[in-house]
Amino acid sequence: MRKILITGANGMLAKAVREKFKENQLICTDVEELDITNLEQVEEFVEKEKPEYIINCAAFTAVDKAEECYDLAEKINAQGPKNLALAAEKVDATLVHISTDYVFDGDLDITKSYTEQDKTAPVTVYGITKRHGEEAVEQNCKKYYIFRTAWLYGDGNNFIRTMLKLGKEKEEVSVVNDQHGSPTYSVDLANIIYQAMEKKIPYGIYHATNQGFTTWYELTKKIYELESLSCRVKPVTSEEFVRPAKRPKNSMLSKEKLLAQGVQIPNWEDAVQRYLKEENARVK
Ligand SMILES: NC(=O)c1ccc[n+]([C@@H]2O[C@H](COP(=O)([O-])OP(=O)(O)OC[C@H]3O[C@@H](n4cnc5c(N)ncnc54)[C@H](OP(=O)(O)O)[C@@H]3O)[C@@H](O)[C@H]2O)c1
């Protein structure tokens, strides 16, 4: 039984983390109980509770909106993790922080995937502020894990939920087919965090997504096939689907470092099937 502080506890990943760690003594806080951008509040709270682990699920995750809100995104994605790192260091807690493929520019040749050693080069406000968050954690506490994930879905608004809705309403949807990555089930990411803690793997940065790679177009086709939806899926390019924040063409993260520690990571197709079962049960 561990004492674990979970921040941003009503978010999509946090729900899966809470379920995975439910046998432990959990302190679940969202912004009302603990605003991670407030150093004084964070230090006071952490010193009082003295958790063994802090799992930071709080973030500013609206990628397009972030382009117009640099200061707020920086506050939540960089100052927040810094405050948690400073507080964790004071009570000798381990900080588990979640980051993103957006710390890379996404221009790597698609025959390759990014490793933890690759140079970061974020090109969006979200990516820049998340990279600042990683740096703040690295510089302000010794006992930390940073898990970079991508294309996350779970119990919350996400791509699969949107495509399911559209697939039931429309005859055809257009989906980009030139962005490559790994759809990642929040339940599987929570399980990766759990295994890392159980195995006491070395502190540091790890890439943590489901295994295997695909495109948003192929993912949509898979969802409709599994759900027997007749909606047609039309492949389009990123240039035909411009968004305020540039999407990385290559979001593929190599999991070799995590796998070398004996961490089990399911394939994305298997994960999507499990998710759809859960999602269908939730709607019923
Ligand atoms: N979603 C993805 O596709 C994706 C991809 C790669 C990486 N990630 C990373 O994975 C992590 C989890 O993402 P998610 O999708 O689960 O996020 P999410 O659902 O947006 O949840 C984030 C939570 O943080 C809370 N929060 C915001 N500001 C806060 C503050 N100042 N203090 C405390 N809590 C605050 C939010 O509360 P409000 O809702 O009230 O603002 C929300 O409950 C994040 O670090 C994200 O950057 C996500």
Image: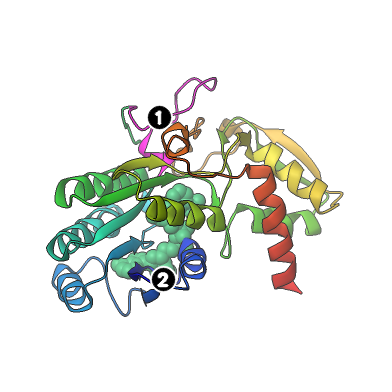
Identify the residue at image location x=56%, y=64%.
156
Mark 1 neighbour class, 10 Å CA radius: few under 14, some 14 to 19, many 20 or more: some
Q: Is residue 273 above or below residue 180?
A: below
Identify the residue at image location x=33%, y=41%.
205
Q: How is the image coloured?
A: rainbow
Residue type for callout 1: Thr
Where, quadrant-wise, is the C terminus in this rendering? bottom right
**Closest to the observer, 7 or 261:** 261
Residue 13, which numbered label?
A: none
Residue 115, which numbered label?
A: 1
Quadrant in the picture for residue 239? top right
Q: Is residue 124 above or below residue 19?
A: above
Percent across and percent down for residue 256 are 46, 32
Mark 2 neighbour class, 10 Å CA radius: few under 14, some 14 to 19, many 20 or more: many
Residue type for callout 2: Ala
Q: Main secondary structure of the magenta part?
A: loop
Mark 2 element type: loop
Q: In the visual, does 265 lie left or right of 172?
A: left
Magenta region: 100-118
Q: Rounded to the nearest whole Å, what is the CA distance between mark 1 and mark 2?
A: 29 Å
**Closest to the observer, 145 or 223:** 145
Identify the residue at image location x=60%, y=35%.
212
Q: Is mark 2 within 8 Å of ligand 1?
A: yes
Q: Which label's residue is closer to the chain start, 1 or 2?
A: 2
Percent across and percent down for residue 225 are 82, 46
**Closest to the observer, 76 or 182:** 182
Where, quadrant-wise, is the N terminus in this rendering? bottom left
**Residue tagged by mark 2?**
9
Percent across and percent down for residue 117 are 33, 28
**Closest to the observer, 163 or 214:** 214
Q: In the visual, does 216 lie left or right of 35?
A: right
